[in-house]
Image (cartoon, rainbow, N blue to C red):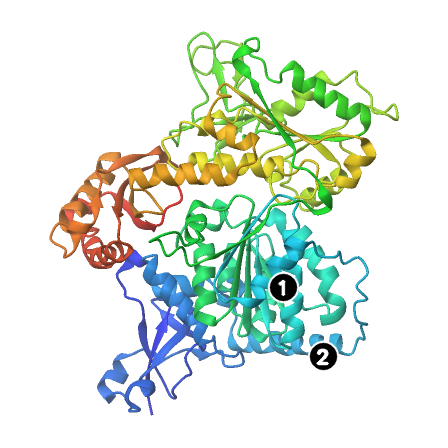
């Protein structure tokens, strides 16, 4: 008997193949079963979404069955993916305007897509034997040594989390001990429910190892070596598959991961923690452009799991959704929990602004800041200098003819990296050696313009070359950014050196500005943060305030160390606009005032969270072709029902309009109603797919829809 089985396979949304492809099989397969199916000349992995037996318990007609291709193999040694997981995938595909199979298959480990049924069975058998061997090892219960006592604020937060079921926004001060709250929530859950699982998400890979170490130290003694696993793109494919299988089987009780972990198959998920929930890294910027934070909230509601969002600088969307009821306003649907005090009675750093208008021209570091860093070095303390631009200099230029190091493939400049003498484009990756002379006029005097972390590190080394540490040794300056941590294990070794006190001045990008628990840093300095103050992107001030406040939070985290050193923690900001309201709020550590002012401005302008947005983007060989496609799409949308509730703005080039010889344009779509926006996008999809094959789509390489874009 043949059965019709509908399978989700990886087909892009713009392919117009539909969400599900139908195949035949000699038996009805359970929903969520992984299968290998033919697609063109390939055999690919798919997920069974439904079979005909579920509809009317009848076999398909013999003629229809013969027209369908047979399923190659069912990977039935693996338990089917659960209903909650399938609902999450279906919602993400629908909301973010992607195909069902694209979301489903991208959520699975890459190595799983290539395994045959026999290979998977062998791997599962080997894994089962390893788990059985691990179970025979005896581990004693944790004795509680080293577990800190909760502060009153932590106690209150824990009580609220235990009492309510709504999503929680844990609004904290940097250094207030939110990680300990996460640990206690997970511990109470696992002790209460012997099968429960917890998902703890962090925004970036470089924050995962130190959090993983804390969770392993706390839970592996009680729950075994396989109780804690990680999921992030920095892992090898076999490592990712092993972690995914452990989560899917329920062996792993705690999954730590970046945004991809929101799709982990966890059949007994009961708690989701999203640390640093404001971070833009939770928004995927390629392929299916989903927000892992928002999907975590949706998944928690669907699966009955508690959701805790934590941040010292929450996103304005989360802040607005956690507003208390006031007058006719019923308030938000999140519960805001405040932890404003640092653990150990530590004080937040004093924020000082340096007016660079009063400094000599071309001053990089003011005299007062250099003196403050020098005092820290003399006392054996550490300083951190933050500049969110890597490389030696953003541009290499000729003073005679005006030549600049433009990328031949992008509308951007190639960055000068002195350490390997290259000009490198950070958008397309094109790199070549630095020319000996100007390529345009032959002038030998070509010079760097601007400053990156590499040049700042060199400059600090020159300024403190004659200064010694308390033990008489030379000052040690280290740099942590995407370039210096490229090698395997480089980040861990550099962080270990900072924690051990082997570094006096740490220079870096936003990689060092958040999440790290540096105990000896007493001074943090931000160099040239003004670029975001007057950006055309309405989210730029929010991102800048968050980054600076998170950077300030790296200073003075150990109150006992400050007392022993008789030191004070400080945050120095060099700016040409010291009177800007953003810096005024930062000096008071007053996120609440900043957020309320930003929300008032956004309400007046009709921007998120008071409106909902999407971007329609087209990539083409020419800018004219890209904009022609968008303009034609705009004309097609006029006839759609409900379009009067949605505003479509004219097509414009992106800020960096050409990347890798591809021209990019976008159209902003906005509505005060999320439902109206979603209705238009859903109805627009088939029109856009048809338009791609018409003359107006000629020259268009790809198009995509970005719902709830993080930057415009």
Location of residue 106 in the rendering, given as x and y in whole percent from the top left corner: 45, 61
Q: What secondary structure is found at the residue carrying circle 1?
A: helix
Residue at (36% x, 65% y) in the render: 91
- Left-right relation of 438 to 382: left
Q: Which is more N-terminal, label 1 or label 2?
A: 2
Q: Nearer the viewer, residue 37 or 147?
A: 147
Of the residues tagged 2 and 1, which is closer to the observer?
1
The C terminus lies in quadrant: top left
Location of residue 136 in the rendering, given as x and y in whole percent from the top left corner: 78, 79
Which residue is under mark 2? 132
Which residue is under mark 1? 185
Residue at (74% x, 57% y) in the render: 149
The N terminus lies in quadrant: bottom left
Find the residue positioned furthest to the right: 471
Task: Say how many tags the image has.
Answer: 2
Q: What secondary structure is found at the residue carrying circle 2?
A: helix
Q: Nearer the viewer, residue 314 or 458?
A: 314
Q: Quadrant of residue 299?
A: bottom left
- Left-right relation of 274 to 329: right
Q: Nearer the viewer, residue 506 or 543?
A: 543
How far apart marks 2 and 1 lie (CA) works out to 28 Å
Location of residue 223 in the rendering, given as x and y in whole percent from the top left corner: 71, 71
Residue at (60% x, 36% y) in the render: 551
**Mark 2–mark 1 CB contact (< 8 Å):** no
Find the residue positioned furthest to the front: 327
Location of residue 573 in the rendering, given as x and y in whole percent from the top left corner: 58, 25
Q: Is 444 above or below relative to 193?
A: above
Is residue 316 visible in the rendered image? The answer is yes
- Left-right relation of 417 to 554: left
């Amino acid at each position: 008997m043949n059965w019709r089985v509908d399978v989700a396979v990886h087909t892009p949304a713009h392919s117009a193949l539909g969400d599900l492809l139908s195949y035949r099989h000699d038996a009805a397969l359970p929903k969520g079963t992984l299968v290998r199916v033919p697609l063109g000349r390939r055999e690919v992995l798919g997920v069974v979404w439904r079979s005909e037996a579920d509809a009317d318990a009848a076999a398909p007609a013999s003629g229809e069955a013969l027209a369908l291709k047979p399923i190659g193999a069912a990977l039935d040694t693996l338990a089917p993916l659960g209903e909650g997981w399938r609902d999450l995938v279906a919602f993400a595909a629908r909301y973010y305007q992607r195909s069902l199979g694209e979301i489903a298959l991208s959520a699975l480990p890459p190595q799983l897509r290539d395994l045959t049924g026999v290979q998977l069975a062998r791997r599962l058998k080997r894994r089962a034997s390893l788990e059985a061997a691990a179970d025979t090892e005896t581990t004693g219960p944790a004795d509680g040594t080293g577990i800190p006592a909760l502060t009153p604020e932590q106690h209150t937060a824990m009580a609220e989390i235990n009492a309510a079921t709504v999503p929680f926004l844990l609004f904290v001060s940097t250094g207030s001990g939110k990680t300990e709250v996460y640990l206690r929530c997970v511990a109470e859950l696992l002790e209460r429910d012997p099968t429960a699982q917890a998902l703890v998400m962090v925004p970036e890979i470089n924050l995962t190892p130190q959090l993983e170490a804390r969770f392993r130290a706390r839970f592996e003694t009680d729950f075994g070596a396989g109780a804690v696993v990680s999921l992030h793109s920095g892992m090898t494919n076999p490592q990712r598959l092993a972690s995914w299988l452990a989560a899917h089987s329920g062996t792993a009780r705690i999954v730590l991961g970046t945004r991809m972990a929101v799709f982990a198959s966890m059949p007994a998920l009961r708690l989701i923690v999203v640390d640093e929930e404001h971070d833009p890294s939770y928004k995927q910027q390629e392929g299916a452009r989903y927000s892992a934070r928002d999907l975590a909230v949706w998944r928690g509601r669907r699966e009955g799991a508690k959701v805790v969002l934590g941040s010292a600088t929450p996103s304005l969307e989360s802040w607005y959704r956690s507003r208390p009821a006031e007058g006719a306003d019923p308030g938000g649907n999140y519960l805001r929990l405040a932890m404003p005090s640092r653990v150990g009675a530590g004080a937040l750093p004093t924020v000082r602004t340096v007016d660079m208008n009063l400094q000599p021209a071309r001053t990089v570091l003011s005299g007062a800041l250099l003196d403050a860093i020098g005092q820290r070095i003399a006392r054996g303390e550490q300083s951190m200098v933050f500049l969110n631009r890597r490389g030696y200099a953003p541009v290499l230029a000729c003073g005679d003819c005006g030549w600049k190091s433009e990328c031949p493939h992008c509308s951007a400049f190639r960055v000068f990296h002195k350490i390997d003498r290259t000009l490198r484009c950070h958008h397309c990756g094109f790199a070549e050696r630095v020319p000996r002379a100007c390529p345009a006029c032959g002038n030998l005097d070509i010079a760097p313009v601007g400053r990156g972390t590499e040049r700042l590190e060199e400059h600090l080394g020159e300024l403190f070359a004659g200064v010694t540490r308390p033990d008489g040794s030379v000052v040690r300056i280290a740099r942590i950014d995407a370039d210096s941590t490229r090698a395997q294990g480089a980040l861990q070794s550099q962080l270990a050196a900072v924690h051990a006190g082997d570094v006096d001045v740490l220079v870096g990008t936003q990689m060092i500005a958040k999440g790290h628990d540096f105990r000896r840093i007493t001074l943090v300095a931000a160099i040239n943060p003004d670029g975001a103050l007057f950006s055309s992107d309405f989210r730029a001030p929010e991102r800048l305030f968050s980054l600076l406040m998170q950077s300030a939070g790296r200073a003075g985290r150990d109150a006992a160390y400050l007392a022993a050193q008789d030191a004070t923690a400080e945050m120095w900001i060099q700016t040409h606009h010291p009177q800007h309201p953003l810096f005024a709020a930062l000096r008071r550590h007053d996120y609440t005032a900043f957020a309320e002012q930003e929300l008032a401005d956004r309400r007046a302008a009709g921007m998120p969270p008071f409106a909902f947005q999407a971007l329609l983007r087209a990539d083409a060989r020419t800018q004219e072709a890209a904009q022609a496609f968008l303009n034609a799409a705009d004309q097609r949308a006029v006839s759609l029902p409900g379009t009067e509730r949605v505003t479509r703005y004219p097509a414009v080039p992106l800020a960096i309009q050409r990347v890798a010889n591809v021209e990019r344009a976008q159209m902003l779509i906005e509505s005060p109603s999320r439902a109206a926006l979603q209705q238009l996008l859903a109805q627009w999809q088939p029109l856009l797919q048809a338009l791609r094959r018409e003359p107006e789509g000629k020259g268009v390489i790809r198009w995509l829809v970005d719902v709830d874009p993080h930057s415009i």
